[in-house]
Image (tube, helix red, strand yellow):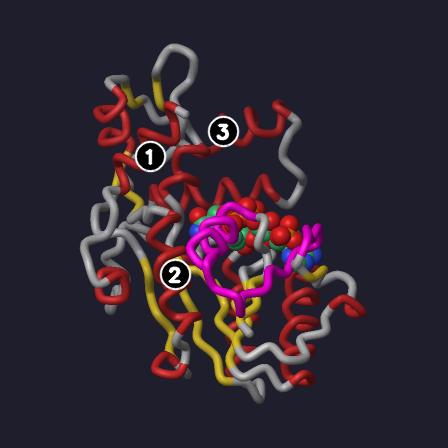
Amino acid sequence: MLMITGATGALGKLVTARLADREDVVVGTRTPGPGGRRVDFDDPSSLDFTGVDTLLVISAGAAEDDVVAARHEAVISAAEKAGVGHLVYTSLSGDGDHLTYALAHRWTERRLRRSTLNWTVLRNGLYAEFLAAIAAPGPDGTIAAPLGDGRLAAVAREDLADVAVRVATDPAPHAGRTYELVGEQPLGGADLARALGGRYEPGTLAATREAITAAGQALPFQVPMLLSTYSAIAGGFLDGTGIENNQLRALLGRAPRNALDVYAKTVRG
Ligand SMILES: NC(=O)c1ccc[n+]([C@@H]2O[C@H](COP(=O)([O-])OP(=O)(O)OC[C@H]3O[C@@H](n4cnc5c(N)ncnc54)[C@H](OP(=O)(O)O)[C@@H]3O)[C@@H](O)[C@H]2O)c1
């Protein structure tokens, strides 16, 4: 049996859609439909992985570090206890250590290395769809995201779903491997503006922090998350040059999707 957690999330939906014709796949989610299982990392009583050969753990990262670490500790412990054959974890690319949300991913990777499980770590780069969310144009068509002259090696979420499916459906050759999965075409603010026919006038981090706070939609921990993302891109840390062994193309077995097209399509809705 192959179980997928986080199955109703954006990445999880893409993964489960690709596995829809397989009878041995079980969807694990906090809100299961028919045939699904309730899996809530915050509720240890829901973490029964008896009979699971492979567990694809889609990180549940939208929370404070202590919460995410506790969630991932709970799921790894439960997998060990149930004798799960192989755990595949979606992490963050190795060049992302300056991001505030890197810590919980690295904590989880370390916990996996110390576990009794066979494991594979998929170090996913930031999504082109995420870039569309954080660097969307304003009403006048101007992109004001504080990316400076920096670029992001964004990757299409669909490509990451393809890799996750490939690894999770035949995990043995990938045991003990940590794969870097980032885009091949780094995108900067000027590239994004060109694709949309608009302008790029980067704001400052201070102005952006103020705007995010004033909008009142971000939870307190999300403000530094977003600011560290802009800062790391602007600082040139996420343009892909810091990744020594990008495995995206090899694991896809083809060229990656065009991240700029995905960005533009996502912005246009
Ligand atoms: N690389 C990037 O650009 C990027 C951007 C954003 C986030 N991420 C990370 O990658 C993960 C997957 O991305 P995504 O786009 O699919 O995010 P998403 O749409 O926010 O989905 C995340 C999923 O995490 C699951 N989750 C949350 N709390 C949980 C809990 N207590 N127990 C079990 N599952 C829980 C939920 O699944 P259910 O509702 O099915 O239970 C949720 O749908 C995120 O969680 C985050 O850690 C990466």
Which residue position is annotated with label 2?
A: 93
Is the C-beta separation of discs 2 and 1 under 8 Å?
no
- Compared with 59, 88 (above or below) is below
Kindly identify the amino acid type of the residue bearing the numbered disc 2: Ser
Residue name at image x 54 percent, y 60 percent: 58
Q: Residues within 10 Å of mark 2 (few under 14, many from 20)?
A: many
Q: Nearer the viewer, residue 19 or 124?
A: 19
Secondary structure state at the residue bearing disc 1: helix
Which residue position is annotated with label 1?
A: 263
Q: Viewer-nearest of labels 3 and 1? A: 1
Q: Say if the magenta span includes residue 17.
A: yes
The alpha-carbon separation of the residues under discs 3 and 2 comes to: 25 Å
Q: Say if the magenta span includes residue 11.
A: yes
Which quarter of the picture shows residue 5? bottom right
Residue name at image x 22 percent, y 66 percent: 250
Mark 1: is the Cβ under 8 angstroms from ligand 1?
no
Q: Residues within 10 Å of mark 1 (few under 14, many from 20)?
A: many
- Residue furthest to the top in view is 140
Kindly identify the amino acid type of the residue bearing the numbered disc 3: Thr
Q: Position of residue 155 (x, y in %)?
A: 32, 49
The alpha-carbon separation of the residues under discs 3 and 1 comes to: 20 Å
Span highlighted in magenta in the image: 9-34
Which residue position is annotated with label 3?
A: 208
Answer left or right for 127 relative to 215.
left
Instruction: Work out whether residue 185 can be spotted.
Output: yes
Q: Viewer-nearest of labels 2 and 1? A: 1
Residue name at image x 56 percent, y 48 percent: 9
State the quadrant of the C terminus. Answer: top left
Secondary structure state at the residue bearing disc 3: helix
Q: Considering only order in the chain, which callout, 1 or 2, is on the residue closer to the N terminus?
A: 2
Mark 2: is the Cβ under 8 angstroms from ligand 1?
yes
